[in-house]
Image (cartoon, rainbow, N blue to C red):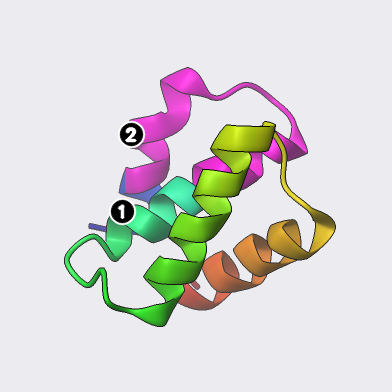
Amino acid sequence: MKFSEYLDKYEPTITEGSTENAAKSLEAILGSLKDDQKNDIYKMGKGIQDYYKKNGSFSPDQAKWIFNTSKGMFK
């Protein structure tokens, strides 16, 4: 599945804002790797997702990781 298809899937639940956009991108990263859950990128993303669910936000380093990873994966 292409990145745009993952974004379309989560579009109805997302509002404008950087945190929501990062969460949307993280869902796309995890969704694209769901069949390879031993992958280090998946493991890191899942840890970030757990942090987000607990705290409702991302750290600056987590946001940067999400941005760089999505940019690299879905160019």
- Identify the residue at the far front of this view: 54
Give residue 14's quadrant in the image: top right
At x 22% / y 72%, what residue is drawn? 36
Mark 2 residue element: helix
Amino acid at dot 2: Lys
> In this figure, which residue is indicated by the disc labeled 2?
9
Q: Which of marks 1 and 2 is in front?
A: 1
Say if residue 74 shows up in the picture.
no
Q: Identify the disc placed on residue 31.
A: 1
Quadrant occupied by the N terminus:
bottom left
Give residue 48's quadrant in the image: bottom right
Q: Is residue 7 magenta?
A: yes
**How far, Cα to Cα, is label 1 from label 2?**
10 Å
Q: Where is residue 50 in the image (x, y as percent from the top left)?
A: 51, 46
Q: Where is residue 62 in the image (x, y as percent from the top left)?
A: 70, 60
At x 60% / y 46%, what residue is drawn? 51
Amino acid at dot 1: Gly
Is 61 above or below relative to 41? above
Q: Nearer the viewer, residue 36 or 70?
A: 36
| Dominant secondary structure, magenta | helix
Task: Tell me where the magenta segment starts and ends, as one range.
Answer: 6-25
Q: Position of residue 13 (x, y in %)?
A: 47, 20
Is 3 above or below relative to 23? below
- Identify the residue at the far right of this view: 60
Is 36 above or below relative to 18? below
Q: Does the magenta stretch include residue 26?
A: no
